Image (cartoon, rainbow, N blue to C red):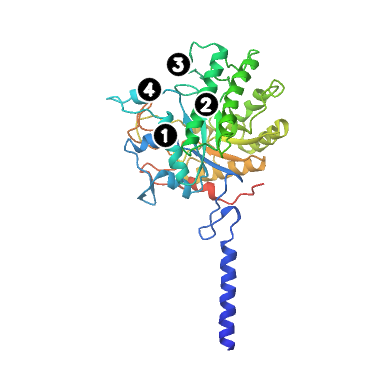
Amino acid sequence: MGRKFRLNHLLTVLIIFSVLLSCRRHNDNPGQGKTFYPAEVFVMGADLSYVNQILEHNGVYRDSGKTEDPYIIFRQYGTNVVRFRLFHNPVWTKEVYTPEGSKMYNDFEDVKEGIRRAKAADMKVCLDFHYSDTWADPSKQQKPAAWESLSLTVLRDSLYNYTFSTLQKLGQSGLMPDYVQPGNEINPGFLLPEGARWNNNEGNMIYLLNGAINAIRDAGNQNIIKPKIIIHIAQPENADSWLNGLAQKGLTDYDFIGLSYYYIWSTVPLDELSNYISNLRSKYLKDVLIMETAYPWTTENADNYGNIINTYKLTDRYPATEQGQFDYLKSLTGEIIEGGGKGIFYWEPAWITSDMKDLWGTGSAWDCNTFFDFTGNTLKGINYMTQKYNVK
């Protein structure tokens, strides 16, 4: 009887211990020593806009030597939000191929497929409207060709209708994005020249931007998912001057200030980033997300497409190695959290070399900054998303 009691007691203790182990803070998996954060707690995001095109042009992704679906790989390594860019009518994405390709990329159908695959892998989605037929960024905010000659009023109507119909169609397919950007890195404004930010043109820019915001809200009102709206500015040092005074002029209905933060282009040292985030949160009463960032794991190149890298801005603390990339991203995430930021997106961590083409080359200009080596295997850097952080 005593032996049976002791065995039952031991069994009870083991069961309790097992239950305690299975209770995971932020979905932590103690068996693997990883922490998986819900997006509501902290966004661990990845921009995978090129992935569908790479897969269709002989790109291969591997984890521990085994070929895997890249969407599954990112989910298994802690990604909780996937970001996709949307161009208006990017016919050039098929014209760059010889012979000409049969489909476009970063258009509605391509983005719809990416969203489907991301959500099937249990990740949320951020949709990045470029409002252009090509890349929109601080150096270029070119209207879609179809909108080129429109008056300001008709331009706003077209902007509203396009934004609303895009989201409505996604919503009807069960693919409503969880986050939406009305514009990408809109430092000079968007839909230039009508939507220019500067030269006393703030009223027109806000008129247009609020048209897009209204469309996002209206589409969300028809769906169980109500997308969060992100206003996206490149580099933290530019955000305060860009936002200053706009709330008083009518730009208020958004949820996040989004920042690009690249070691190559920003003047803000890594250990000062938390101060910028904290100050923006305090002044504008909005949460802050880092929408784009990257860091190299090598200075080598996998193909003949020249890499975008600046070795002069690398430091001994964060060399261009697997460990250096991992350490940098872990430190960066800590800085974001210290400043009260709500998440981080890594820009194009899956832009590996392949037969994919864009306007400037074949392969990848980013293969030194990915989370995959030159054979497509995952690198240590991808593990930064599942580290233990003191999330506030």
In-front residue for pair 343/319: 343
Residue 87, x across and y down, in percent: 45, 25
Residue 360, x across and y down, in percent: 38, 24
Residue for point 58% across, 89% down: 1
Residue for point 51% across, 33% down: 127
Identified by mark 2, the residue type is: Thr
Identified by mark 4, the residue type is: Trp
Q: Earlier in the sequence, mark 3 or mark 4?
A: 4
Residue for point 56% across, 54% down: 27
Q: Earlier in the sequence, mark 1 or mark 4?
A: 1
In-front residue for pair 316/327: 327
Q: Which mark is residue 50?
A: 1
Q: Which mark is residue 163?
A: 2
Q: Earlier in the sequence, mark 4 or mark 2?
A: 4
Q: What distance separates the C-alpha of mark 1 from that of mark 2? A: 22 Å
Any part of residue 366 in sight: no
Q: Are marks 1 and 2 in contact (CB under 8 Å)?
A: no
Which image quadrant for residue 308? top left
Badge 3 crowding class, 10 Å Cα cut-off, few under 14, some 14 to 19, many 20 or more, is few
Q: What distance separates the C-alpha of mark 4 from that of mark 2? A: 22 Å
In the image: residue 75, left or right of residue 302: right
Q: What distance separates the C-alpha of mark 1 from that of mark 4? A: 15 Å
**Element at badge 3?**
helix
Identified by mark 3, the residue type is: Ala
Q: Which residue is mark 4?
A: 92
Q: Which mark is residue 146?
A: 3
Badge 2 crowding class, 10 Å Cα cut-off, few under 14, some 14 to 19, many 20 or more, is many
